[in-house]
Image (cartoon, grey):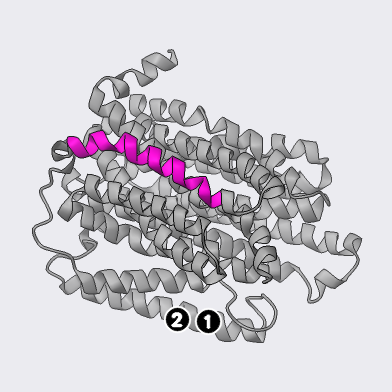
Amino acid sequence: MTFSEILGPILATRQRREVLAALTAAYMLVQLSSLPVALSLPSIAEYFGVGIDDTAWIVVIYLMVLGAFVLLSARIGDLYGHVRVFYLGIAVATLSGILLTVAGELWHLIAVRAVAGIGSAMIMGNANAILAITFPPGERGRAFAIPTIGARVGTLTGLIIFGAFLHFVGWRPVFAALVPLGVIAMAVSVPMLRHRRPLDTSKVGQGGIDWAGAVLLMAAIAAFMLSGAHLHGGDESFVSPDGLRYHLPMHLLTLLMLGAFLLVERRAASPIVELRHFKNRMFSFSLGANVTFHSSMLGTMTLVPILVEEGFGMSPLWVTVALLPSQVLGLFIPILAGWIYDRSHPKFMRLWLLLLIAGGFLVLSLTGSNLSFWALPLLMLPIAIGSNMFNPVNNASIMNSLPLEHRGTASGMLETTRELGHALGATAAAAVLALALPAGAALVPQAVARVYFLDGFKLATLAVVGVLLLGAALAYFQQPQQQTRT
């Protein structure tokens, strides 16, 4: 079986090629707006003369707004057309790149990044729905793999080019680079606008939006994400007196907002989320597995730099070297995974993939600090293979689990759980690492501190393994895949 035979069916018509080109370009834009931008935080902090904790809001506010608005964006797409909202999201993201490039104050950057989060939410909340309309369930595994590869290209491009910009020019070109890609994404999405009627045909959308439920859900998600940020005085700790006085009330606020949201949704005529969908085990358990999977991915991005910089005592440049092989695998493995899924629908495919990722983290925890740096990319291969295969397969499973007329709900919840997983992974990794580090660890000699950081790395990695095993359990106990015919 050649790649042309695998890809041939999903590229068979002009409309399919146009949709995949638009979604791939948009995925690249969103991916460039997230992880690679984080590389610029130290340079921005030095430019404005502030601490890294202040510039961290550039990333925090983006992820918070993206996670909070993505489901509402998908619901608006149900009402007014997924293509229209998707295209407007690209325009907003592109405009934000221009404004970020010319920002004169740090708070300008933070405010515009919030706007960029709205643009990304409009893109991601509707991209999955557009793909589900274009491709039948038996082809969605391969179809999802194409934008996933585009996102990987975005990450690789950002890691390489942004690093050069920061070293030789400064931080402004990092944001300026978003503009030409945004223009390209808008250009390749124009054909969808011209022929949007088949893509926007919907059986729902006449009942309006439950704005009360939408606001409560956004508040709950925002409170949850803020609960992982250290907005309190004193040490950046979850267990210090200052930390407890901040984090515990934020967790309580999250639960209160979530409880209020559920009460409102039960009584709403046109709920933002129909709670009956969660009785569908395929839908709800796949969403749970999505949270655990993306939690482990943020764990990787949080823990590997700690191992490289604190464990091996190497510069941040070598973090890119450690992650590069796994990123390269993402350029072709998703297609193979999507083809296997579409062709035979292996019953326990996602279970074994999550176990493969968990096994990789376990080996990394037990042996990573005892081997040379050059063994690290090899140790990460199971994580890379499992991750690159799981993502398109689980995305297709979520979109296949509900009828097509509820594609907005499926698309919005897919992306909401993705962002919740990112927030949970970063928070959990930081919390477990903090438990292993004694007070004043930063003040002790490097050789002594190295031992503490390695112990924290092992403990945090084992926590990631536990989360992945929970996801594997969800993948095991859900009902076998039943495709929704449309």
Q: Residue at x 45, y 26 (%)?
A: 336
Per the image, label 1 sits on a secondary structure element best described as helix
Q: What whole-number distance in Å separates the C-alpha atoms at marks 2 and 1?
A: 6 Å
Query: Which class describes the residues within 10 Å of circle 1: few (<14), some (14-19), or many (20+)?
Result: some
Q: Of the numbered discs in the image, which one, if any, rests on residue 248?
A: 1
Badges 2 and 1: C-beta atoms under 8 Å apart?
A: yes
Q: Residue at x 12, y 43 (%)?
A: 201
142 sits left or right of 134 in the view:
right
Query: Does the rendering let one see residue 35?
Result: no
Which corner quadrant holds the C terminus?
Answer: top left
Give coordinates of residue 226: x percent, y percent. Answer: 50, 72
* Region of the chain picked out in magenta, as a range: 174-194
231 sits left or right of 20 in the view:
right
Query: Does the rendering let one see residue 199?
Result: yes
Give coordinates of residue 286: x percent, y percent. Answer: 37, 49
**Residue 188 inside the magenta-drawn segment:** yes
Q: Is residue 441 above or below residue 332?
A: below
Residue bearing the label numbered 2: 252
Instruction: Give the main secondary structure, helix, strand or loop, of the magenta stretch.
Output: helix
